[in-house]
Image (cartoon, rainbow, N blue to C red):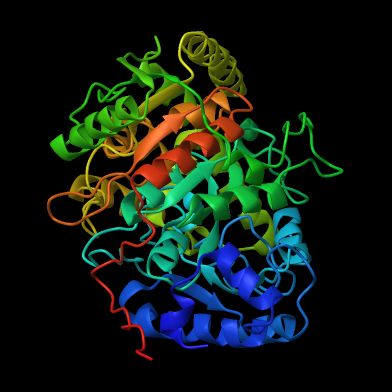
């Protein structure tokens, strides 16, 4: 299979070619690998190549709805037995996983053929993908800009045509942010919909979930069918959907009540392109027959963010301390930013942690009240176009504090101040809209409906009530038909011209 032929198909299309004998799984895999090698020098999207393992699997792929389709795993939480999951961290880079994660097992059972793992920020802690250990991933629309994070390597690869779909996960926007930056469709499932085990139960009390990034809605629907459902160790199994998610994409969403806002929940600036993206989406929705009103939940966005950060800091402290205990590594094996976040976690008491989590309930109730009046909430996915590489690096004063922390191990010099939290909040002004769905556990999606005047993608977000994945997919399919996006090709990487007959 030629690369130009490969690029014409989504995952469903490739599976059909293979199932009907018009292409073989090995030749499709080789086309994917060739495409990866064409663009990888520009993108730095892949951090671990598994080509030989993939070739072995492609020779005899399991029978499934996506049998033989090339795929990429995110290098965070998505363990593949015998290969490391580095999470962007030096200490874990050469520690092989002892077994498959349940989500990986389901992808393999569906017939997918993973052939590499994708770049992430260390432990997925940022909305950009610039790990010290591997270097920055770059946006195929303009390689001077970020593909977002933390699923930035996956998003860059899908947008560049390396694969039609790739693994992601989302603990604070990490599927939706890269989707918005790279012109992709990104659905974050709701709490408990997709398994995280067996190594993990409910990271961040279920705020973090596995999922995928795709170019087409039907690929996301089929992959959600593949992923969804409890595993034997699921803490709280939830009811299955009324019908397969693939069936939702053929159903009319009906006339929806949609509330929209372009105001940052942190009260900070929203770029005019993000405002334009939301208001243009609102006009499109009205043209499609939906009732669209400017409205937002009665939630204090700054308080919600602080409650989220209390648990985020604590989680980073537990993660760093656990890795040190398991591997014998030292602070020198972690990025200074990670050590700062972990240090912040150690200054919080167990009571602070529990009280912060208890306050999540008030935000859940406020969003539920909004959804009693509106079917969906529409916002920007991010507050402005994808930033340039290095734009969100810590300022000089914080770099100095980080160096002092690493050199002297005197955490109190950093943590007995509000400056760190202030800097974290400043960085979150670029991505203030996504935390709401993670904290409340509701499904949400980023839809690529807008491109800026400079040619960068800028998605819009829809947040549904609990168990609203089907509703999101119905609307997404309608929007995809009304304003198609999968044919758009990034301008920052080369695309081969289709061969003439």
Q: Which percent across, then down, holds residue 147?
A: 34, 58
Quarter-of-image position of residue 283: top left
Q: Which percent across, then down, holds residue 384?
A: 22, 41
Q: Residue furthest bottom?
A: 501
The residue under the point 31% across, 83% down is 497
Residue 348 appears in the picture as rendered: no
Q: Which percent across, then down, holds residue 361?
A: 57, 14
Q: Nearer the viewer, residue 68 or 189?
A: 68
Q: Nearer the viewer, residue 434 or 339?
A: 434
Q: Nearer the viewer, residue 310 or 441?
A: 441
The quarter of the image holding the C terminus is bottom left
The residue under the point 39% across, 51% down is 178
Residue 190 appears in the picture as rendered: yes
Q: Answer above or below: position of 306 versus 404.
A: above
Q: Residue furthest right?
A: 232
The residue under the point 37% across, 24% down is 289
Quarter-of-image position of residue 491: bottom left
Q: Which percent across, then down, holds residue 358?
A: 59, 15
- Badge count: 0
| In this picture, residue 77 sits left or right of residue 145 | right
């Amino acid at each position: 299979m030629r690369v130009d032929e490969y690029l014409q198909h989504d995952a469903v299309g490739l599976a059909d070619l293979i199932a009907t004998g018009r292409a073989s799984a090995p030749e499709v895999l080789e086309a994917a690998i060739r495409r990866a090698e064409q663009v990888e020098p520009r993108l730095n999207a892949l951090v671990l190549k598994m080509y030989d393992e993939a070739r072995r699997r492609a020779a005899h792929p399991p029978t499934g709805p996506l049998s033989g389709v090339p795929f990429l795993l995110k290098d965070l939480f998505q363990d593949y037995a015998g290969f490391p999951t580095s999470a962007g961290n030096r200490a874990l880079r050469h520690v092989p996983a002892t077994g498959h994660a349940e989500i990986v097992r389901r992808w393999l059972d569906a017939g997918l053929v993973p052939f590499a793992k994708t770049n992430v920020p260390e432990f997925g802690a940022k909305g950009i993908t610039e790990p010290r250990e591997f270097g920055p991933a770059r946006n195929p629309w303009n390689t001077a800009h970020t593909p977002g994070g933390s699923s930035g390597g996956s998003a860059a690869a899908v947008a560049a045509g390396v694969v039609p779909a790739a693994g992601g996960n989302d603990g604070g926007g990490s599927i939706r942010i890269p989707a918005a930056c790279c012109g992709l469709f990104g659905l974050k499932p709701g709490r408990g919909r997709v398994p995280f085990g067996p190594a993990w139960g409910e990271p961040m009390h279920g705020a973090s979930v596995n999922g995928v990034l795709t170019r087409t809605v039907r690929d996301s629907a089929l992959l959600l069918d593949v992923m969804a459902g409890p595993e034997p160790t699921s803490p709280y199994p939830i009811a299955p959907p009324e019908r397969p998610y693939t069936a939702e994409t053929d159903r009319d969403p009906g006339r929806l009540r949609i509330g929209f806002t372009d105001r940052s929940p942190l009260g900070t600036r929203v770029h005019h392109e993000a405002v334009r993206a939301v208001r243009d989406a609102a006009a499109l929705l009205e043209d499609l027959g939906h009732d669209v009103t400017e409205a937002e939940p009665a939630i204090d966005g700054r308080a919600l963010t602080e409650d989220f950060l209390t648990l985020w800091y604590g989680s980073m402290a537990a993660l760093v301390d656990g890795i040190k205990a398991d591997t014998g590594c030292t602070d020198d094996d972690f990025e200074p930013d990670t050590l700062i976040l972990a240090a912040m976690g150690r200054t919080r008491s167990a009571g602070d942690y529990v009280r912060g989590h208890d306050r999540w309930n008030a935000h859940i109730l406020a969003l539920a009240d909004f959804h009693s009046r509106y079917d969906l909430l529409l916002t920007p996915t991010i507050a402005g176009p994808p930033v340039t590489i290095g734009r969100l690096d810590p300022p000089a004063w914080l770099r100095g504090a980080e160096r002092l922390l690493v050199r002297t191990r005197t955490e109190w010099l950093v943590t007995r101040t509000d400056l760190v939290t202030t800097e974290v909040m400043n960085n979150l002004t670029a991505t203030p809209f996504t935390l709401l769905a993670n904290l409340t556990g509701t499904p949400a999606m980023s839809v690529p409906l807008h491109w800026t005047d400079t040619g960068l993608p800028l998605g819009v977000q829809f947040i549904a009530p609990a168990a609203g994945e089907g509703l999101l997919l119905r609307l997404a399919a309608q929007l995809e038909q009304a304003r198609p996006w999968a044919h758009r090709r990034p301008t920052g990487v080369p695309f081969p011209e289709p061969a003439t007959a």
